[in-house]
């Protein structure tokens, strides 16, 4: 039995003008992931927590107030991930290729879940 090969990035670009990460995968899909979306979906243990899923998409606490966050830098981590640095000082999450692929592929659903969670928790996208 053969398993599908994990998605592999063929292009990864910090688009400063549009404040987003542009990523293309060998599976023929490409995604434009804006800074706010990447910041609030961070895989960082500090923001995701260690308990049952409570926040949007990937679990943990809900991160609000990031509508104006800027993506500042990308740092490759081996051959499996990238560390993203934001202007709010956050730079602890490692975004694996599989996680970025999931964020791109499921963006519409994850974003709507995030907005609903903000509303439910009385939080705002604005600081």
Image (cartoon, grey):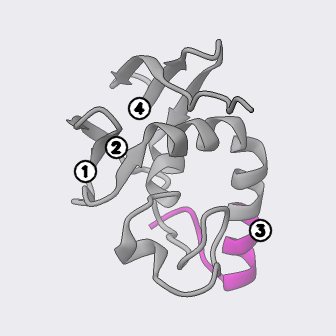
In the rendered image of this protein, does residue 49 appear above or below residue 76? below
**Residue annotated with mark 4:** 19
Q: Which mark is residue 116?
A: 3
Where residue 37 sits in the image (x, y, percent)?
A: 54, 48
| Circle nearer the N terminus (2, 4) | 4
In the rendered image of this protein, does residue 127 appear above or below residue 13? below
Is residue 119 within the magenta segment?
Answer: yes
Say whether residue 121 is left or right of residue 62.
right
CB atoms at circles 1 and 3 under 8 Å apart?
no
Element at badge 3? helix
Quarter of the image where the C terminus is located = bottom left
CB atoms at circles 4 and 3 under 8 Å apart?
no
Residue at the image point whose x is 26% and y is 60% from the top: 92
Q: For marks 2 and 4, give the CA distance.
A: 6 Å
Crowd band around label 4 with a 10 angstrom C-alpha radius: few (<14), some (14–19), many (20+) = some
| Circle nearer the N terminus (4, 3) | 4
Say whether residue 28 is left or right of residue 79.
right
**Residue annotated with mark 1:** 87
Magenta stretch in the rendered image: 115-127
**Residue annotated with mark 2:** 70
């Amino acid at each position: 039995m053969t398993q599908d090969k994990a998605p592999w990035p063929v292009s990864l670009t910090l688009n400063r003008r549009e404040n987003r990460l542009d990523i293309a995968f060998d599976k023929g899909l490409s995604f434009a992931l804006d800074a706010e979306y990447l910041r609030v979906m961070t895989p960082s243990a500090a923001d995701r927590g260690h308990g049952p899923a409570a926040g949007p998409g990937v679990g943990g606490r809900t991160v609000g107030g990031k509508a104006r966050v800027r993506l500042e830098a990308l740092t490759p981590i081996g051959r499996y991930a990238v560390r993203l640095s934001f202007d709010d000082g956050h730079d602890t999450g490692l975004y694996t290729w599989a996680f970025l692929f999931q964020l791109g592929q499921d963006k519409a659903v994850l974003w709507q879940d995030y907005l609903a969670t903000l509303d439910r928790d009385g939080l705002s996208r604005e600081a």
